[in-house]
Amino acid sequence: TDQYTAANLPIWWQIPQYLLIGVSEIFASISGLEFAYSEAPKTMQAVIMGLFFCISGVGSLLGSGLLSLLSVPENGWMHCPKDYGNINNCHMDWYFFLLGGIQAAAVLLFAWISFRYEKQQREDCHLCINRSNQNSSLPSS
């Protein structure tokens, strides 16, 4: 029979990690949904918000797929047949460095897109200062 020996570590050590994950999910979801809602045309706001949630789900699916791909028995980094249940020999460090590299590439892509992004001007903007005054001062042709 396989015997699994867990580390002698209190479960309370997990609380900070789960709190940080929860807070980061809240910040990412709120800002992403607000951006999607504010930049979408009025008739497309529900579709854009649905796409936002769909893309979040696809990201989670890709993360699970990456973990499964790295655990294949032939040459996966995280396949440990001789030491089942113990992650010390599974090169978890390589996996986390890979995730860090993917996130660094995503940050660079985000920065590149955000510097080139131009905010859309909306006709029904209630917060635009003197927008109606600017339109009325233009000479009509």
Image: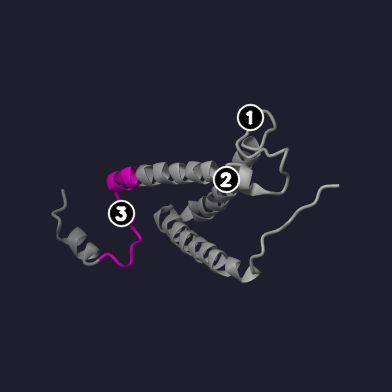
Measured as percent of width and height from the top left, residue 39 is found at: 40, 54
Mark sitting on residue 75? 1
State the extent of the magenta-drawn residues as a range.
Answer: 111-128
Residue at the (49%, 53%) spot, across then down: 43
Coloring basis for residues: one colour
Displayed quadrant of residue 38: bottom left
Q: Nearer the viewer, residue 9 or 118?
A: 9
In this rendering, the answer to whether 21 lies above or below 107 is below
In this rendering, the answer to whether 120 lies above or below 19 is above
Q: Earlier in the sequence, mark 1 or mark 2?
A: 1
The span from disc 1 to disc 2 (Cα, nearest Å) is 14 Å
The span from disc 1 to disc 3 (Cα, nearest Å) is 52 Å
Disc 1 marks which amino acid? Asn
Q: Earlier in the sequence, mark 1 or mark 3?
A: 1
- The answer to if 114 sits in the magenta stretch is yes
Is residue 64 shown left or right of residue 55?
Answer: right
The residue that mark 3 highlights is 121
The residue that mark 2 highlights is 92
Crowding at label 1, few (<14), some or many (≥20) Cα neighbours within 10 Å? Answer: few
Displayed quadrant of residue 68: top right
Q: Nearer the viewer, mark 3 or mark 2?
A: 2
